[in-house]
């Protein structure tokens, strides 16, 4: 069953929804990257919660006009309108009053959602219209979706993705280097507005699939995940789109296969699994690689200090240093240096003396910048320079 | 309306609502000033998985294990946010977004996959609670307040919320000076020897306690609203922290009372038969209060000078 779902064998509607979710996930991943780079990730939380009153009002209006209130396009239009109002209020509170942006986000989010809940309880008491299904907007539900709705979702997700891809360049520029963008004549405020418009589109299209509480995850988790793998903005954008698309695809397919599970939570958990994996194993920024780097550095420090101690005839008590020296064959387990170890120790001491000489000479300022107590001076200076330095080492310090 | 009707039906929800509002608004003042306003948002989302896990382990909907589960989840969330932020070198907002959505998603999945049909535990309840259901069955009128037998059947949410309010208020009163100094000038607070990070953590824990206790009675949405809206509105009224806290308590009480009354009786006034969600209405009223202060509050603009004296 799960295999069938992943291979899109569960019927036309499920396939359409899964494809729509994948496109939406890619659009969210790409769009979310700019939000993340501008450090405004949580604005999307306010936008998504602000859709609820719009959905409820649209339902009420449609029922009053004599419909069943189930027209998805109508509901999504309502959602987009109230989300836009919420977005404007966030930016108004953040710029025109002295409240910080987080307070503006939190107040808009909670008040709009609270008002939406009030409207939902009003709808529950209405006799007309088919109100079942409105709750699906909270957590996303794609089960038993009408073909026309699936169509709407697939097409609008594709449009959103196309829009994001079209606007990729100015958005990248504005989020990576806003000052430069201004200097070449780009209107950064308009770009920001466009970015928010994109986020709004992703949110509204994603309402039925992911639900308004969790759509923010689809905008945040992919870029954060992508950031682990690369330092380049254009690569972050692409990886983030791939992560978003993959999470949404796997999540939507699984939820089509397992009955009675809302779609949104599965998509979010798949995305989080990708995030956790990246946090652990990504090269460079991942935890495992950071640990390995730390161990290597630690080893170098211990070996160096051990050699210097040996060269100066001081006893070594530190267990890790002893173990490392022994493993290198530079010392016996009790810390007495071997023949090889004595040679290395003398070299380490000479290295220190050479560093001391060039540290006191401004002519070597550039080379001194690389002095971290570990780097071999022979990798920094040329043979001629070394000979010059050696000539200046006080003879009392010369070992060997 | 007379006492025979008001006391059993409306007194307890009203008082509980006020306690929740004030208990959340008090720490909210400091969270808003420290730009940590969204911590309330994060905490109230992660309470759900905590409660569900507690239910799955304990098998019953009893209060203490659920409170413990919720508190445990809040602590795990704070730790996880910090871990993601440090390990991944990610800004706090995004780290919070990753952690709380994931934990909430996990909670929803657990809830949907486990058999909770026999008990009153679902996502909607977690989001917007049920303030109206706190009915004091044995009360017959105002005299019941002095009747030990009737008091024994008082819904447990009210005394619990009152105790939480006392605890939060005591914490703020006790640590008033350190909190104030470290909120406005953390560097200075450190130079005079205050330990600012344990203090900040204690504040977040207090907020979590308020959120968890409130959550059971009123759901999470009102908790977020009360953490942010009354303090934010109060911030636009004054430049002095003492006055801000006082304003926020006033606004929170006003929102709770007006919200409850409007939800219960408002629909009747305009000719509808049923009441609407009290929690939602309280959040809405707090938003209206914030909107009014944002339009006319004397200190609504950035950089408005402090009054001399």
Image (tube, rainbow, N blue to C red):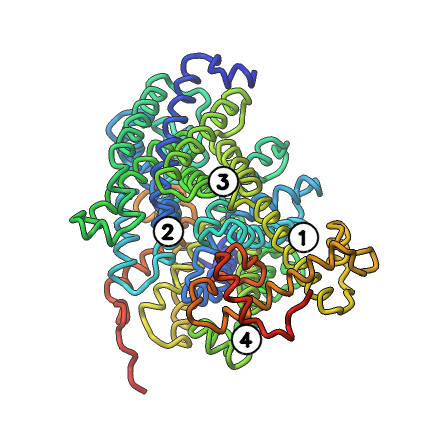
Disc 2 is placed on an element classified as loop
| Residue closest to the far bottom | B309
Q: Chain of mark 2?
A: A
Query: Residue at label 3?
Result: B124
Query: Residue at label 4?
Result: B175
Q: Are marks 2 and 3 on the same chain?
A: no
- First reached walking from the N terminus: tag 4 or tag 1: 1
Query: Residue at label 2?
Result: A39
Q: What is the C-alpha distance between the residues marked 3 and 4?
A: 37 Å
Q: What is the C-alpha distance between the residues marked 1 and 3?
A: 21 Å
Residue B218 visible in image: no
Disc 1 packing (10 Å; few <14; some 14–19; many ≥20) = few
Q: Could you tell whether A158 is left or right of A184 in the image? A: right
**Tag nearer the camera, 2 or 4:** 2
**Tag nearer the camera, 1 or 2:** 2
The number of callouts visible is 4
Query: Residue at label 1?
Result: B64
Q: Chain of mark 4?
A: B
Q: Chain of mark 3?
A: B
Q: Position of residue A153 (x, y in %)?
A: 34, 25
Disc 3 is placed on an element classified as helix
Which residue occupies 46% across, 22% down?
A: A143
Q: Are marks 2 and 4 on the same chain?
A: no
Q: What is the C-alpha distance between the residues marked 1 and 2?
A: 39 Å
Q: Chain of mark 1?
A: B
Q: Are marks 1 and 3 on the same chain?
A: yes
**Tag nearer the camera, 4 or 1:** 4
């Amino acid at each position: 069953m799960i295999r069938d779902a992943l291979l899109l064998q569960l019927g036309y509607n499920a396939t359409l929804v899964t494809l729509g979710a994948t496109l939406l996930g890619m659009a969210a991943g790409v769009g979310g990257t700019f939000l993340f780079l501008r450090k405004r990730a949580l604005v999307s939380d306010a936008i998504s919660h602000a859709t609820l009153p719009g959905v409820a009002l649209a339902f009420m209006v449609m029922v009053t006009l004599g419909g069943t209130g189930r027209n998805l396009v109508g509901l999504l239009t309502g959602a987009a309108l109230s989300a836009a109002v919420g977005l404007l209020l966030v930016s108004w509170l953040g710029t025109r009053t002295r409240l910080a942006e987080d307070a503006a986000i939190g107040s808009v989010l909670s008040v709009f959602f609270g008002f939406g809940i009030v409207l939902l309880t009003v709808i529950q008491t209405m006799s007309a219209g088919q109100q079942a299904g409105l709750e699906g907007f909270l957590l996303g539900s794609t089960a038993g979706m009408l073909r026309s709705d699936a169509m709407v979702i697939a097409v609008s997700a594709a449009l959103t993705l196309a829009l994001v891809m079209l606007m990729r360049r100015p958005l990248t520029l504005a989020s990576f280097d806003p000052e430069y963008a201004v200097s070449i004549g780009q209107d950064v405020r308009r770009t920001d507005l466009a970015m928010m418009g994109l986020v709004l589109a992703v949110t509204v299209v994603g309402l039925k699939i992911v639900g308004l509480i969790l759509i923010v995850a689809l905008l945040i988790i992919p870029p954060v995940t992508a950031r682990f793998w690369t330092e380049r903005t254009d690569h972050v954008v692409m990886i983030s789109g791939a992560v978003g698309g993959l999470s949404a695809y796997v999540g939507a397919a699984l939820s089509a296969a397992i009955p009675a599970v809302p779609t949104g939570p599965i998509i979010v958990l798949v995305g989080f699994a990708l995030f956790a994996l990246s946090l652990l194993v990504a090269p460079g920024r991942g935890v495992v690689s950071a640990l390995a780097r730390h161990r290597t550095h630690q080893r170098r420090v211990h070996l160096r200090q051990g050699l210097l101690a040996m060269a100066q005839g001081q006893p070594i008590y530190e267990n890790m240093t002893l173990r490392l020296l022994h493993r290198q064959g530079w010392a016996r387990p009790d810390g007495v240096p071997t023949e090889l170890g004595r040679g290395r120790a003398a070299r380490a001491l000479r290295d220190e003396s050479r560093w001391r000489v060039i540290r006191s000479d401004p002519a070597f300022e550039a080379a001194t910048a690389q002095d971290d107590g570990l780097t071999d001076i022979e990798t920094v200076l040329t043979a001629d320079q070394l000979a010059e330095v050696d000539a200046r080492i006080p003879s009392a310090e010369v070992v060997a | 309306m007379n006492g025979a009707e008001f006391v059993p039906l409306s007194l307890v929800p009203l008082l509980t609502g006020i306690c929740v509002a004030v208990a959340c608004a008090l720490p909210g003042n400091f969270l808003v000033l420290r730009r940590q306003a969204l911590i309330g948002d994060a905490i109230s989302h992660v309470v759900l998985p905590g409660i569900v896990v507690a239910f799955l382990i304990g098998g019953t909907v009893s209060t203490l294990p659920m409170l413990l589960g919720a508190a445990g989840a809040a602590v795990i969330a704070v730790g996880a946010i910090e871990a993601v932020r440090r390990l991944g070198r990610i800004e706090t907002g995004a780290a919070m977004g990753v952690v709380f959505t994931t934990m909430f998603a996990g909670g929803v999945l657990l809830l949907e996959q486990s058999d909770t049909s026999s008990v009153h535990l679902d996502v909607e309840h977690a989001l917007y609670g049920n303030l109206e259901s706190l009915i004091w069955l044995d009360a017959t009128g105002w005299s019941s307040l002095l009747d030990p037998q009737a008091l024994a059947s008082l819904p447990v949410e009210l005394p619990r919320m009152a105790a939480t309010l006392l605890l939060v208020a005591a914490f703020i009163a006790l640590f008033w000076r350190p909190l104030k100094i470290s909120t406005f000038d953390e560097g200075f607070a450190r130079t005079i020897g205050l330990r600012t990070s344990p203090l900040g953590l204690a504040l977040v824990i207090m907020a979590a306690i308020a959120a968890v206790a409130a959550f059971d009675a009123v759901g999470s949405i009102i908790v977020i609203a009360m953490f942010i809206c009354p303090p934010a509105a109060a911030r636009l009224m004054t430049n002095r922290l003492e006055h801000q806290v006082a304003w926020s308590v006033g606004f929170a009480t006003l929102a709770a009372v007006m919200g409850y009354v409007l939800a219960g009786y408002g629909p009747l006034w305009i000719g509808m038969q049923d009441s609407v969600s009290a929690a939602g209405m309280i959040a809405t009223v707090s938003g209206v209060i914030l909107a009014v202060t944002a339009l006319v509050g004397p200190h609504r603009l950035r950089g408005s000078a402090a009054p001399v004296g």
